[in-house]
Amino acid sequence: MCQRLDKPYYTDELDSAFLQCKKEHGYLSDDEVAKYGNEIIGFYFKNVNTLRQNKNKSFVDSEKDGFVHKTANSNTQNKKEQTIQRYSDIKGNNISSNQNEKLIVWSDQDKQNKQYAIEVVGYDPFEEYPEEGRKFLFNQLSPYLEDDSNADDAYKLSQILQIIKNNYQIDICDKKMSQLDPLKDAESIKTLSDIKNKLVQSNDKIAKENEISVKNRSNKDAGKSTLTYLMRDLREKDFDKAEADYYDQLRGVGSQWATDMSIKAIKENGIFDENDKKEIYEMQLDMIAALNKEVDELKEKIRILTLENDRLKAGVG
């Protein structure tokens, strides 16, 4: 790649990019970090384009230098073989990773959770995650969406997504710790445990501040009687006529009662000065005028349609 782009290739610079990426993903092993090829390459070219020692350097220049900066210390030079070895099997690792992803099977329920989540959120919130992670994330998100108050509150939903993503990181930490030896890898386990604890604390704080919880989490049938679940279930069964009619909702007895109570509460508890009253009065006049105009236009449409209907019934062109 560097040769095609005529950019310098320095193994010590590549190792520096690797360490930058490792810093971003401190809970991963070196082998796992090495799979983040795109990020490592991004750091590498950023360094190549910004550091003074790489200024005006070409691939040929780096080749003359033996692919190691002349100013690099002996310790860095000794890492040359280690760096080359580290990336020599990235291609193989990527192939293995892709094969593993192909083995991930999404059940009908998994697919349903994914489709509904994207529909509610409005986009794919886990697009950048690996396939295995996406399956975990969508299934974690699903119970929260059964609660109408969560699905209808954009900010609350964003906080739920953060909790879900934190849960994914916690799951990674747990899996990683399960593979470590408590005696040999005590330091790594401590680091992972600290990361996990911080994520758990963050989740607790977000949940408390936003009153987030999985409704009736102990009940497997929780949420199945809610409008959200029923609409979702009927939609999947192609019952198009089951969609909520907003006009009918507004005309409903319950909606009218809620509106009347709201207006009554405003009248009894609202404190308005003369300017407020004047502004409200003017707004009401504008709304009445607009509604009267709309009514007149609709009446005219009805009149025209009625005449056309009569002509059709009479058999007149």
Image (tube, helix red, strand yellow):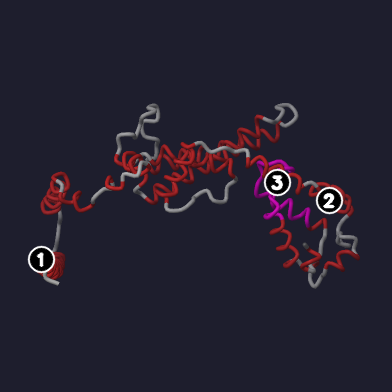
Q: Residue at horizontal 65%, vertical 46%?
A: 25
Helix, strand or loop: magenta stretch: helix
Q: Nearer the viewer, mark 2 or mark 1?
A: 1
Which callout, 1 or 3, points at the residue further toward the start of the chain? 3
* Quadrant location, the C terminus: bottom left
Q: Residues within 10 Å of mark 1 (few under 14, many from 20)?
A: few
Q: Looking at the picture, how far across and down is residue 225, in whole percent?
A: 30, 34
Please tell me whether mark 1 sits on a helix, a strand or a loop: helix
Q: Would you name the residue on which mark 2 appears?
A: 84
Q: Residue at horizontal 77%, vertical 68%?
A: 5
Left or right, 316 with reference to 71: left
Viewer-proximal residue among 273 and 290 = 290
Q: Residues within 10 Å of mark 2 (few under 14, many from 20)?
A: some
Please state which amino acid type lies under the numbered disc 1.
Thr
Specify start and end residues of the magenta stretch as a single range: 14-40
Please state which amino acid type lies under the numbered disc 3.
Val
Which callout, 3 or 2, points at the residue further toward the start of the chain? 3
Q: Would you name the residue on which mark 1 appears?
A: 306
Please state which amino acid type lies under the numbered disc 2.
Ile
* Observer able to see residue 1: yes
Viewer-proximal residue among 24 and 191 = 24
* Observer able to see residue 292: no
Q: Looking at the picture, how far across and down is residue 22, in whole percent?
A: 70, 48
Q: Looking at the picture, how far across and down is residue 305, in whole percent?
A: 13, 67
Q: Looking at the picture, how far across and down is residue 201, in whole percent?
A: 50, 38
Q: Residue at horizontal 37%, vertical 46%?
A: 151
Which callout, 2 or 1, points at the residue further toward the start of the chain? 2
* Numbered badge on residue 33: 3
